[in-house]
Image (spheres, rainbow, N blue to C red):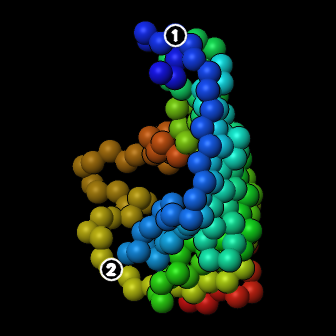
Amino acid sequence: GLGGGRCGDSVGSVTGMGGARVVEGLHYGGDMCDGRLRAHRAATGIALDGLRFTGGDGTFEATGLIALPGERNGGTSRVTWKAERFRITNRPDLHFVVNGDGSIALENRRLALHGNVTVVEGHVEYEPSPTGKLASDIVIKGRPAETREAQARTVPLALDVEVDLGRDLTF
């Protein structure tokens, strides 16, 4: 086990390598491969010593700590990442190659994403479709208006990402 339970507080490590597909989302155009993982059990969770995979001719790398819920020492989950010419998607209507760095953390029960991303190459073909939902700034008479602050508190995601659309992004 990885801690507690009948096996006590164990410490260990895992290393994985190979040319197999790491993430394959063909309907999104994703095709990430050549994954490598090095991790070990730490006192406050799972230490990610290195995660690396390729997308196109670029790479994505990450390190950090993934805290386990209920641990006595209560670590904080925080993973830093870096992308270099990393191909996120490769469909004819949606294509992105990016550079960037940042972090992903669990803060106040919300997933917080901080960082900088530069689109090195990209192409987006957008076709609007009606969603059947009114915009958040439209209030229907007789229904209470929800404030932006109240809406923001209910979203389990906090974003602080600077995006540079670069010179080679087309719509």
Q: Position of residue 49 (x, y in %)?
A: 71, 41
Q: Is residue 163 above or below residue 161?
A: below
Image marks 2 and 1: residues in contact by CB distance under 8 Å: no
Residue drawn at point x = 46 percent, y = 77 percent: 29
Residue position for label 2: 129
Residue drawn at point x = 57 percent, y = 86 percent: 123
Q: Is residue 150 left or right of residue 122?
A: left
Q: Quadrant of the C terminus?
A: bottom right
Secondary-structure class at tag 2: loop
Q: Is residue 13 above or below residue 123?
A: above
**Disc sitting over residue 44 in the figure:** none
Q: Please, what is the three-letter code of the amino acid marked with disc 2?
A: Ser
Q: Say whether disc 2 or disc 1 marks the residue closer to the N-terminus.
A: 1
Residue position for label 1: 8
Q: Please, what is the three-letter code of the amino acid marked with disc 1?
A: Gly
Does the rendering let one see residue 165?
no
Q: Position of residue 140 (x, y in %)?
A: 29, 57
Residue drawn at point x = 62 percent, y = 77 percent: 56
